[in-house]
Image (cartoon, rainbow, N blue to C red):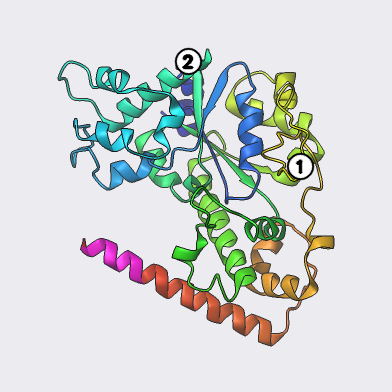
Amino acid sequence: MGKEARGAESADRGTNPFVFLVGCPRSGTTLLRRIVDAHPQIAVTPETHWLPRFCTKGVGCTPEGLVTPALLPRLLGHGRFPDLGVGRAELERLLGDGEPVTYAQFVGGLFDLYGRAQGKRLVGDKTPGYVRKIRTLHALWPASRFVHLIRDGRDVCLSARTWKRRDGTTGLEADYPTWADEPVITAALWWADHVRRGRRWGRKLGPGLYCEVRYEALVARPAEECARLCAFLGVGFDERMLRFHEGRTVAAPGLSAKDAWLPITPGLRDWRTQMPASDLERFEAAAGPLLDELGYPRAVPHPPAEALARAAQVAALCFARRRARTSAGSQT
């Protein structure tokens, strides 16, 4: 059976996870999640972060991919798991009466539970970083679809520089040793890595399982883009997707667009007016070719040699850190 046929079958039988919403962090994936979650047939879980890691690292799984009871305490102890609203008793029932249960089946059952609580048949996941794990996720759930949200990296950079996660960091400090000294070039490399990996593996799946959505198009023409997205997902377009914010918007000073539950709003970030010329030069020296590939106009078509050399130096440092971490991981 071809990939497109498997994707269509997924919508018919309600196999979960039905869809993964992915993209470089700070690209608007929370907005996309709220839009899709407002569809009457699709529920989208909060970010999970553990789906591919637990399986590939053998956490509560045998080498053959079968779940063991050791998975339950690791799930229940994960900081993100309580967001799903599933308790220990329900997890134990997913293990069945002793018959072997694969990790893919177990997670599918978990997503089914979340969907039933929301009154919806199809359930997806929104974890931006999974854009780098498309190959692993596809191997686990061959019928799952992937929606890759892409945003102009210069606007992503603006957002990343003010980003604070639950632990008070951006998350880039540990993986990118150059973040403190060269945040703009580092953000450019970080964005480019996420986008390129997502496109490389997503396109191998074909148009039946992989769809790219531009953030700029989504906020400029929301009805048109939502209709296109629904066609990809095999569900009818519903106007409620555009009204996800109704009854939730908070009018309070100082809140971010996310915390204020703003409606679809163009222009929340604009590198043309908010990014200093020196930062534009640094960013485009590091990620200019990808901007060109994606069709985003450059502000600095020909960065000076000094900026290009510095971008190459930062990239080499980041690559050396990644290679060292990969080598250390392979030895544990």
Magenta stretch, residue numbers? 324-331
* Residue receiving disc 2: 117
Element marked by disc 1: helix
In the visual, does 128 lie left or right of 39?
A: left
> Label 1: how many residues lie within 10 Å, few (<14), some (14-19) or many (20+)?
some
Tell me the residue at 43%/42% (across/down): 49
Tell me the residue at 66%/44% (across/down): 28
Q: Quadrant of residue 262?
A: top right
In the depicted structure, whether residue 267 falls above or below residue 280: above
Counting from the top left corner in percent of width and height, residue 9 is at 47, 21
Q: Is residue 25 visible?
A: yes
Counting from the top left corner in percent of width and height, residue 83 is at 46, 31
The number of discs equals 2
Is residue 330 located in the magenta-colored stretch of the structure? yes
> Label 2: how many residues lie within 10 Å, few (<14), some (14-19) or many (20+)?
some
Q: Quadrant of residue 328?
A: bottom left
In the depicted structure, whether residue 118 falls above or below residue 214: above
In the depicted structure, whether residue 130 falls above or below residue 296: above
* Residue receiving disc 1: 217
